[in-house]
Amino acid sequence: MDGSKTIETTEVAAQKHRFTVEEYHRIGEAGIFDETRVELIDGEIYNMSPINSPHGGTVKWLNRLLNRLLGNEYIVSIQDPVTLDNLSEPEPDVAVLKMREDFYTDSHPTPEDILLLIEVADSSLDNDKRVKLPKYAQAGIGEVWIMDINEQCIEVYTHPREDTYRNKSTYLINEVVETALLGTLPVKDIFPKRKS
């Protein structure tokens, strides 16, 4: 015998702590994020992309367009939280919501309140498709648009199933979008006019 001992080791896998919506709110109330724009998805806190002029202008245009088209029957919510489940509270660029007398002052909108979500994407395109879109499908959001500012096109996702959408249609700038909520709209009218 050489006197050596065998030491058995066990590996302990590191585990992520997933924050609940309630914990996320407490962190925000404590001022931890200061002015940093963040959102909670699957219990993880994500930094949001800075809003550049084309992105901000497109969101403003959509706000005006949707309020004009929908009148007072619905609420058009701009970059406000929606609570998808106990671990996810993203902030889509635009949400068209069912009218509620309290205007959602008692609680953030939940999937049952959401008629249409729109993500305006430039630098956030990959994150919107890879991270947020599956969560919207899991939550049963019936219609999601991803507006690609760079390509000037709109991807419309409908018929959620598990973490994906069964239908995806892409509309180019010279085409027409048809939706249950808004009817028929030329894509060129959904994007704001830009200097060029």
Image (tube, rainbow, N blue to C red):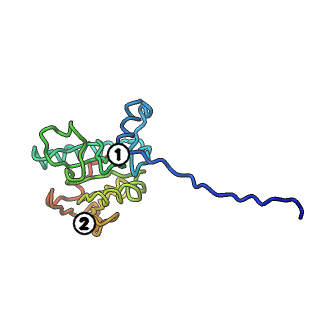
Identify residue for label 2: 159
The residue type indicated by label 2 comes to: His
* Left or right: 41 as drawn, with respect to 194: right
Quadrant (top left, top right, bottom left, bottom right) of the N terminus: bottom right
Numbered mark located on residue 54 in the image = 1
Q: Position of residue 79 (x, y in %)?
A: 30, 42
Examine the image and state in which quarter residue 152 appears: bottom left
User: How many labels, in total?
Assistant: 2
Q: Residue furthest front?
A: 1
Identified at 77% across, 60% down, the residue is: 6
The residue type indicated by label 1 comes to: Pro
What kind of element bears circle 1? helix
* Left or right: 80 as drawn, with respect to 181: right
CA separation in Å, label 1 and label 2: 30 Å
**Of circles 1 and 2, which is in front?**
2
- Badge 2 crowding class, 10 Å Cα cut-off, few under 14, some 14 to 19, many 20 or more, is some
Examine the image and state in which quarter residue 45 appears: top left
Q: Residue furthest right?
A: 2
Identified at 35% across, 45% down, the residue is: 54
Q: Position of residue 163 (x, y in %)?
A: 34, 63
Q: Position of residue 129 (x, y in %)?
A: 38, 58
Using the image as rendered, state which of residue 12 and residue 31 is in the foreground.
12
Numbered mark located on residue 43 in the image = none
Using the image as rendered, state which of residue 13 and residue 165 is in the foreground.
13
Q: Earlier in the sequence, mark 1 or mark 2?
A: 1
Q: Is residue 52 above or below residue 181?
A: above
